Image (cartoon, rainbow, N blue to C red):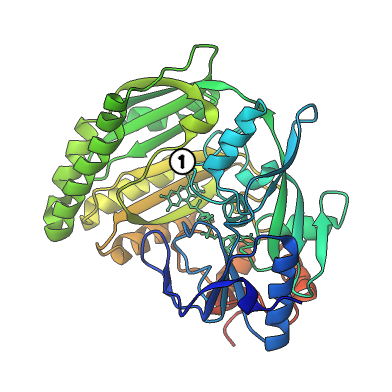
Amino acid sequence: MLSVEDVVHKSRYRWSNWSGVCVTSPQTIVYPSTVEEVVSVVQSCAVRGQNLRVVGAGHSFTPLAATHDVLMSLDRLSGLVDVQVEERTATVWAGTRLKTLGELLHHHGLAQENLGDIDVQSIAGAISTGTHGTGGNFGTIATQVIGLTVVLASGEVVDCSETSHPELFYALRVSLGALGVLVKVKLRLVPSFRMVYESRRMPLLECLNQLDELKADHRHFEFYWFPHTDMAQVKWMDETADAVQVRSMKKYFQDVVMENRVYGALSELCRTMPTLCKTVSRLSANNVPVSRTVDYSHRLFATQRLVRFNEMEYNLPSAAMRETVLEMEEEVRRAKFAVHFPVECRFVRGDDIWLSPAYQRDSAYIAVHMYKGMEYEPYFTAMERIFRTKNGRPHWGKLHTQRAETLAGLYPRWNDFQRIRAIVDPSGMFLNDYLNALFHPTP
Ligand SMILES: Cc1cc2nc3c(=O)[nH]c(=O)nc-3n(C[C@H](O)[C@H](O)[C@H](O)COP(=O)(O)OP(=O)(O)OC[C@H]3O[C@@H](n4cnc5c(N)ncnc54)[C@H](O)[C@@H]3O)c2cc1C
């Protein structure tokens, strides 16, 4: 049996997430490159009584990956295992990054039906927190999963799906790395397709009054409201037969590099002088890009986020979008929060995954952001208070203050999830302090 040392590549490692808000010092970080190595590490942790946390791309804002013991990255378990083009399915290694996955699938004429707004996450990390995009006819990325292979705390390797170990499957798709190490993911796919993306400026009220039409008229619709203003940016994407518009290096530099640089510089100004937030938000609202782009779906969903921030996002019943945004607008006006990042508003179809925030409800998702290094607590706390009055469920990968006491009541299958967890990980190998607080009420 291999021991942890055989696959250790760094020790006394200091790890931090993308935004820098979570820092942890695991004793070791391991990079297994086969399922057998994953099993060996798990068995070795069991023998030593060590905790094990798995990390994807570290793009969650919550300390899900934090551990003082063993941190495991599946960066070496990446790529396609097999593809069934006729069946439109593929099995992929769990560490595969979404960007790589998109290109690999495209090569076979296949694509994921929907994605979030970045593509740097690992497929296992993305599904484990319920990562989603927008589009009322599409569920979270986890709903694209039709089979999983997991290494449990016992070292057993289990394949599960709707028909094989179905309870494990319903618990595992959104499971925060708390049930075991996902090593393979089988996905339901669609043929590659091109989309046209359009962005424009719209008064917030006009947008809120037309939500049903905008949602119905477009495959993917979302909007951003600029705090301290009454303006929004609306974005939509629809399938098209038009040819891909190739973006020159010059245009890429203007659109991505310059836009991010300018926004980064303005954000730095806001950090040093928070009273400027209002002006910067207004400036952004006045300069909403009016654009149209055509590309293959996997390239169009993703944007590059070069300016770092912290974020809270809540899932609400879909019908609550309008009134919630209006209440947020009123609260921002009253409390004059120093915030210049826009509020992101999306729609997602309900699902049947036990810990999915979209469990059994068609959903609105509202996200608030604060530039890295700026105080986010007062703003996030006030917004969370509003979200909670709407029966909001927090995005597992984003900042929130809910714990077992309140979470249990939000999820009808909460106890079933905990029952399965107790069976597959009786010693709590896959828990850390943060998950303990999420799962166990304080005595
Ligand atoms: C700039 C930015 C943009 C974002 N945009 C969106 C968006 O559009 N929509 C959205 O919903 N979210 C979004 N997020 C949140 C992000 O998608 C989630 O937090 C996602 O879980 C991060 O994936 P990751 O690969 O970085 O996983 P990590 O953050 O590293 O891990 C997430 C969870 O997955 C578990 N995990 C990872 N790999 C495995 C494995 N092999 N087996 C078992 N468990 C595993 C970890 O233990 C952890 O609990 C964004 C985040 C950032 C920073």
Say above or below: 224 vs 127: above
x and y percent of residue 254 in the render?
25, 30
The furthest residue to the right: 163
Which residue is depicted at the point 23% across and 39% down?
229
x and y percent of residue 286 in the render?
20, 31
Name the residue type under label 1.
Asp
Image check: 302 left or right of 256? right
Which residue is depicted at the point 45% across and 53% down?
313
The furthest residue to the front: 6
How crowded pointer 1 is (Cα within 10 Å; few <14, some 14-19, many 20+) is rated as: some
Q: Quadrant of the N terminus?
A: bottom right
Instruction: Give the number of marks.
Output: 1
Q: Is residue 111 visible?
A: no
Look at mark 1 in the image and give the residue it sits on: 117
Image check: 195 left or right of 45? left
Which residue is depicted at the point 38% across and 41% down?
304
Label 1 CB sits under 8 Å from any ligand 1 atom: yes
Q: Is residue 277 visible?
A: yes
Which residue is depicted at the point 49% across and 43% down?
119
